Structures are given as structure tokens and as C-alpha cells.
Amino acid sequence: MSNMPFGFSGRDDDSDRPGDNPFDPAAGFDPAALGRMLTEFGQMLSNMGEGGGPGGGSGPVNYDVAKQLARRQLGSTVEPVSPESAAAVAEAAHLAELWLDAATTLPAGATKTVAWTANDWLENTIDTWKRLCDPVAQQVSGVWTNTLPDEARDMAGPMLGMLVSMGGYAFGSQLGQALGQLAQEVLTSTDVGLPLGPAGTAALLPAAIAEFGSGLEQDEREILVFLAAREAAHQRLFHHVPWLRQRLLGAVEDYARGIKVDFSAIEEAAAGIDPAALQDPSKLEELLAQNAFEPQTTPEQKQALERLETMLALIEGWVETVVTEALGERLPGVAALTETLRRRRATGGPAEQTFATLVGLELRPRKLREAGALWRTLTEQAGLDGRDGVWAHPDLLPDSADLDDPTAFIAGITSGEAGFDPIAALEETQAREREAQEKKDRGDDKPDSSSPE
């Protein structure tokens, strides 16, 4: 975890720029900067008093503020998608779907394909970001009420309420800045590996795709068809594997909920402050600025992270395998584009960096190459039915150890039975587990006490 999740960092990376602090002796007193600071502070208090709009300030993150700041970062010059770009996206998606039909048993999953602007992406993904970010913010918000001594909490009651509101505003501010950056970089609705957009909607962002392709020696139409195929493959998987979306987002939520703070450090910091002084906002700010609030990595988080990384690798590896199978002989640049996206993910592109800031983890499929090799081998040895049938139930999927050494996993699927039925295999496993449990309940598994030692 290379970045602190949002809400933990005491300041933004660029908070030391000259002129940002009106009282900076080196820069001289700047009345204009002071005026801006007071205006923004007044707007913050106004937003807190009004709840930040309908539903905006009722939770741990002020999402109205987040959307306002993200839109401000995008600016008012976001060009609408031209009819020509929209038509090109529709044509690329149609062609990609036709070619994918021969590469997977999963039918088309998108009910519509759209061309989004950065603003469209923001509007259509904010609900998923709420689900991802709320657990982190709730953990941080609960630190104060759960760790301060009773006397201090009673005396600081009104200020603690304001602190929670200020926290929601601060979280919303940081989220807005991050989403404003991310909205300008993502290529599709599934670009970060998660189903951020509405179910059944395949979305491509022509402006970002044009920027992405400007540094590549590839045909623009080929790039568009390649990305449309990746988006369509993701949509097929998320639509026809009904448990996958919940399992994937749930792993992110589990990771966020596992965030723990060093309570002993907080208690030590709080013990040195006069409870009466907690009515002074500057004292609360002083306590917040201390390093007692850095999150600690827990065993639960490590387990959730391993599950998430394995799931992401399996998804991305399957998408790579299917897209290469569908386009490999039709578009000569597929291999180079695939490697470009791999490097983009491996080096932590804008999407990964932003997600690390927002949720506190690096969203990278670290075992992507191993997962891709596993899916390709399954395709060769078990066919499309055997490969895609593994997605029938989460218990059938390979785990992290299987990616390290897939021999036993592949052998279990391709054990000489041409018509491998994953559901039948699952039912057989469950039947054995039920039989073992019934024996245990009856006591049949206990040793016979009358038998000689």
C-alpha cells in the first residue's frame, strides 16, 4: 500500500506551493490569497449547514462537493461527442461483438454501447464510487467518537459534530480532485478492472482514446476496435457471471473495512490535550496533524487484497485471452496493444494511482501473465466450454496458488473426460462435503472406543 487512503493524508501533495499560504513569511502577506481562503471556508460551512445538497452531506463523504470539484477540474470546455465519433464507436462495438462470438461461449452482455465524455463518465460511475469509498470514510469518521475518553468526548461534543461534517467535506474534496483527473484518463467503463458503470452498458471515451493512441504507431480504427472488444468481453463476463460483480466489489469493501488505526497512539495523543481545549478548532487540527492516524495493515486486509488481486488477474487474463483469440488474426496490432495496456497497469497508470489514493490499495492484477497462461492452456486442453465453464461458480475458480502452479488445477478439469461439466463437478464436491458433515453430526467419524489401542 504505497499511498494513504483518502482522508488520512494531512495535506495535498501540492499544498506547499508558493502563494497558497497567505501568512507565508517567505512569500509575503497576500490579501487575495487570504480572501480566497476565507471564501472557500465560508462556502464549506454553508455546504455543511445545508447538508451539501440532497443527500450530499448525510454520509461520511460529501459527494455533492466531490462532483462539483471534479466538474470544475474538467472545466467548461469538455467537447460533446461528435456524431462521427459516436458512429465510429457503435461500428467498432458491433464488429467486436461479431468476432467475440467465435472466441467465447458467453453471449453478448451489453444491451447498449455508448460514447461518453469525461462528464458522462463522472455522472455514470459516481454511485459505484460511493460504494467503494464509504467504508474507508466510515472507518476514519468513527476514530474520534470511538477512541476519545468520555470526558473529552462530552466536552468536545459540538466540535466533534463539526469535525465529522468537515471530514465529509474534506473526503469529498479529495475524491472530487481524484475523479476529475481520472475522468480525463480512462478509456472505457471497465478500464480500472472494475464494473464502474451501469450494468449492461458498454462505454468508450473517444477523447481519451484519441489521446491514448496519439503516442502509438497504430491505426486509430484498430485501437478503437481493440478497446471495444475488451469492453465487450468485460460486459459478457460481468453479465453472464451474476455473482462476479458482487464478489469483486465486495472484496474492495472488505479491504476498506479492514483498515485499522493505532488506537494506542491516538489515546496517547489525546491524553496530552486538556479536554476543555477540545472546544478550540485549532487544537483539533493540531491533533489531526499528528502521525497517530496512519492506517495499519491487518491480516484481514492482506487476505482481502490477495482475493482481489487474484480475481482481477483472472478477469483480465480471461479478457486478454478471449480478445486475442477473437482479433489476433484480424488486427495485426493486437499483441502490441495488449502489451501496452499490460505495461500501463504494471507501472501504475493514472487509474491505479488514483484508486490507490481513494481506497488505499494498488489496484493491479499482479499475476496477470500467470492468469493469461492458465486460460490459454485451458482453451487448448478443455476447449471454450471447459474454459468458460469455470466461471459457473466461485468455488470452481483457481486461487492464487493455482496461478503459481496451475498443473493440478488444469489436470482436474482436463482429466480425460471430454465433456467436463463444471456444475456436475461442483455438485459432486458439495455432496461429498454434505456426507462428511452428516457423518460428523451422527458421530460416525469418531473412533470406536471399544477397539484396542
Image (tube, rainbow, N blue to C red):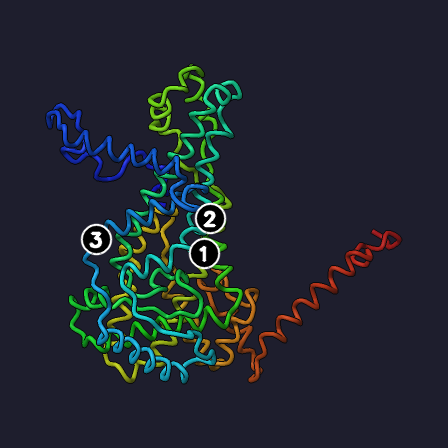
Which mark's residue is nearer the viewer, 3 or 1?
3
Q: Amino acid at mark 1?
A: Leu
**Residue 178 locus on image (x, y percent):** 30, 49
Q: Are marks 2 and 1 in contact (CB under 8 Å)?
A: yes
Q: Residue visible at 51% across and 60% down?
A: 246
Which numbered tag is attached to residue 75? 3
Left or right, residue 443 beside residue 255: right
The residue at which mark 1 appears reads as 308
Give neighbour class at mark 1: few <14, some 14-19, many 20+ (Cα, 10 Å).
Answer: many
* Residue 108 at x, y percent in the picture: 43, 78
Q: Residue furthest right?
A: 450
Label 3 and label 2: CA atoms lie apart by 33 Å
Secondary structure under the numbered disc 1 in the rendered image: helix
**Mark 2 sits on what residue?**
255
User: Residue 28 location, x and y as percent?
Assistant: 10, 25
Secondary structure beneath dot 2 equals helix
Look at the picture and state if 85 lies above or below 43: below
Label whose residue precedes the other's in the sequence (2 or 1): 2
The amino acid at mark 2 is: Tyr
Quadrant of the image containing the N terminus: top left
The answer to whether the residue labelled 3 contacts the one labelled 2, judged by CB atoms less than 8 Å apart, is: no
